[in-house]
Amino acid sequence: MPTAPPHTFPAEGRVRLPYTCLHTMTPFLEEGSITTIASPTGEGKTTFALDLVRYAAAAGHRTLYLHSSQSEDGIRVRLLAAEAEVSNTQIRTNDLTQQDQERLDQARQTIDMWPLHLSHQSTWTLEDIKNEAERNDYELIVVDDTDQVRIPGAPLAERFARLSAGLRDIVAGESTVLVAVAQLDPPTEHTGGFTAAERLRQLGHRYALAQDSELVILTSLDKVVPFRGGSGLRLSMQVAKNRQGATGSVEVQAEMHFCRCVDLTEEETDPDPWPESLSI
């Protein structure tokens, strides 16, 4: 089975993306940058975001994860499952072997040592996000469920423009990387009928946040079938560099009930990069 890459980061301290294939395409999340992760419901965006959080915090980067759709307990279970290499279900039902329990105890001690702060509110405002960001000198801030951020007094058409401007203001002049997770649900058509290019254009049309991001990553379940080990699904990541560099796609394996991702081996996939960059 493929293994996750070691938690190594460049000397200059910039946050590195997990997975060898993705890092090769887009080497660093630059200081002061915004990255958008988007997909329809249940297509792996939070899984990828949590893997990035886990990867960065384990390497010593001061990390903040803001979320609303899941409880803080639910997020901790997912992080524990990933670090201990057991499934979320096993933890929740206490269906653990002695070896599983030992790994879980070790994972809990490890996570408690990370410079990671999890913060949950049912509804966030831009002011809430700014206040949380100012509590520490964070190197990575992940804002999940950005489509649920409340913008008081803003018409629907202006919400994401205001959100984009507000998040950009948080990282302006700072050594912080901000990752925004956005839901992309076409209102009338089945998501499976959309090509990657169409999804990106729709994202750019609906969310000013994507247009203002240096990097856009779309996640989707490429093949909803178990791998030969029976423990994971294939997660496709379609990458667009808005400002510079190549656009392309990579694939990783979502393991153990979506609690972590690992690189796919060469014999399992041979991803074809898009022939040209996509402007959104």
Image (cartoon, rainbow, N blue to C red):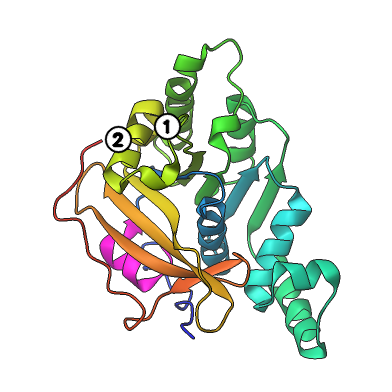
Magenta-colored stretch includes residue 268: no
**Residue 131: horizontal and vertical position, in percent?**
63, 32
Q: Residue at x 45, y 30 (%)?
A: 188
Going from N to C along the chain, the mark reached first, 2 or 1, is 1
Q: How many numbered callouts?
A: 2
Residue 94 relative to residue 142: left or right: right
Magenta stretch, residue numbers: 17-28
| Residue matched to label 1 | 168
Tell me the quarter of the image containing the C terminus: top left
Tell me the amino acid under the disc marked 1: Arg
Check residue 201 in the rendering and tell me which mark sits there, or answer none: 2
Q: Which mark is residue 118?
A: none
Image location (x, y in percent) of residue 134? 59, 37
Q: Is residue 24 left or right of residue 38?
A: left
- Residue at image coords 63%, 60%: 115
| Residue 15 in view here | no
Q: Tell me the element at label 1.
A: helix
Q: For the view shown, which residue lies furthest in the left direction?
A: 276
Looking at the picture, tell me which residue is in the foreground, 230 or 165.
230
